[in-house]
Image: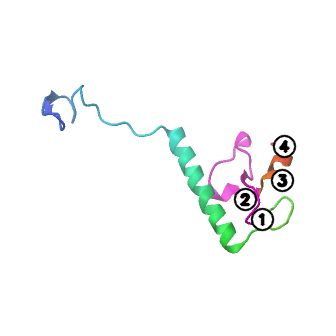
Amino acid sequence: MQRACTVCGAPSNGSRCELHPAKRSPSSRATSQRRHKDRRARMIESALAGGVDCPLCEKRIGLADAIDVDHITPLGAGGTDDEWNLRLTHASCNRSKGASA
């Protein structure tokens, strides 16, 4: 059964004709990256509001410090981007740790 395109009214097999395809949702990778950035922003806001210590060097992360979001269990070892697997660290501490921990 054909229906009318919701944009131009032309006959179509779905809700839109070939000239007006439905908009595709963003790729899962782009969505994942956006969620990761959102989580990072929330974590940084909370750290700056209440203060947090770097788990690698055990020193306070300050307002002027470069901050990284570290995966407790690395992605390569089966870790996820879930909040429970992320922690804030000094950028220098995280970079010196590398992917070995």
Circles 2 and 1 in contact, beta carbons < 8 Å = yes
Circles 3 and 4 in contact, beta carbons < 8 Å = no
Residue 39 visible in the snapshot: yes
The quadrant the N terminus occupies is top left
How far separated are the C-alphas under marks 1 and 3? 11 Å
The stretch in magenta equals 62-89
**Residue named by callout 2:** 88
How far separated are the C-alphas under marks 1 and 4? 22 Å
Name the amino acid type tagged 1. Answer: Ile
How far separated are the C-alphas under marks 3 and 2? 10 Å
Q: Secondary structure at mark 3?
A: helix
**Residue named by callout 4:** 100
Tell whether 95 sits left or right of 16.
Answer: right
Which badge, 4 or 2, is on the more N-terminal residue? Answer: 2
Name the amino acid type tagged 3. Answer: Cys
Residue 101 visible in the snapshot: no
Look at 40% across and 40% down and name the residue there: 25
Look at 80% across and 42% down and name the residue there: 99
Any magenta on residue 71?
yes
Look at 59% across and 56% down and name the residue there: 39
**Residue named by callout 1:** 61
Mark in front: 2 vs 1: 1
**Residue named by callout 3:** 93
Mark in front: 3 vs 4: 3
Look at 12% across and 33% down and name the residue there: 9
